[in-house]
Image (cartoon, rainbow, N blue to C red):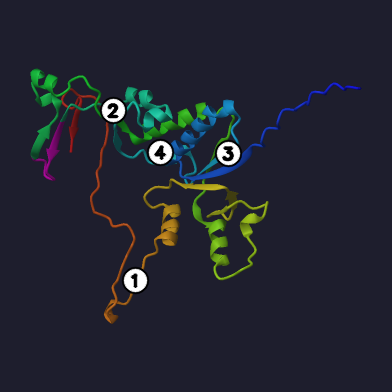
Amino acid sequence: MSSSRQQPIRRGKSAAAPTKTCHVAIIGSGLGGISAALAIINIQNEKKQSAPATKYKITIYERDKTLSDRKEGYGMTLTYDPNGPLQKLGVLEEVAKRDCPSRCHYLFTADGVVKGYFGNAFYKEEELNKRGSGQRGNLRIPRAELRSILLKALQANDVDHNVCISWGKRLLGYVDRAMMDKLNQIGKKECKKTSSDDHQRPVLLTFDDGTTDEVDLLIGADGVNSVVAKQYLQTVLPTTKTNSAAGEVVTDTSPEQIGIFIILGITNHFHPLIDERGFY
């Protein structure tokens, strides 16, 4: 009777899944655009140890020629929240260092008459203790300074150089090839899918200098007059205008403006009479 020793089965290490590169386009290098890029980079850095399946390459397209072209704008009032977005972006304490606190506020009419005033400075100390004295209040910081803080954080965290800012690029519009495929297939059994081409990415961008670019993901952060939002809303929420004279109802699904805006200005000028005071 013969016997044979069973040979152990050698199992090789499973090959790691190939890393996919996702090209992201962010339109606008303001607070929203830089924050979006910083959030993506922070997430990518956190997952670097676990061999992430997706690697992000980010291009921020800005219509301004340089960083200094944009007007500084007004100030902002932000919430000091240890669990909020500023903390998640990693800039909360830096913003807190640049805080311009105000303890009293005055309201004026257009001709300079004081309508009222409020703030902690008008309360007695014993009353302040009842109101949670010592707690961190809101943060007030110039918009341009907040933008500078976010940009420095982005540059510091982008250790693999996956982010670039392309200046002087004004977006004219985009083509969502995936959406075009769906529209082309309506009522057709066979249709050539443009997005299935390996040489094409899902979104085609067109700029006013005649150039184009192809990306996998488009983020619109181009402000209140956003080209991206305007085109997108026209696609998903078309404005419908019918003939009211014929007895039909006229409907408009575009966002309604309420006609209210707030302006907050911050000055670096110091004077005892305006220290930690706000005037509106």
Where does the magenta region start and end? 105-113
Mark pair 1, 2: CA separation: 50 Å
The residue identified by callout 3 is 57
Among the two numbered marks 1 and 2 on one chain, the one whose residue lies closer to the N terminus: 1
Mark pair 1, 4: CA separation: 35 Å
Quarter occupied by the C terminus: top left
Mark 3 lies on a secondary structure that is strand
Q: Is residue 227 left or right of residue 180?
A: left
Where residue 194 appears, as percent x and y from the top left, is 63, 59
Q: Is residue 240 left or right of residue 54?
A: left
- Mark 1 Cα-neighbour bin, 10 Å: few <14, some 14–19, many ≥20: few
Total numbered labels: 4
Q: In the orientation shown, which residue stands out farthest toward the right?
A: 1
The residue identified by callout 4 is 31
Mark pair 3, 1: CA separation: 41 Å
Residue name at image x 41 percent, y 29 percent: 88
Type of residue at label 2? Answer: Asn
Mark 4 lies on a secondary structure that is helix
Among the two numbered marks 2 and 3 on one chain, the one whose residue lies closer to the N terminus: 3
Residue 149 in sight from this viewpoint = no
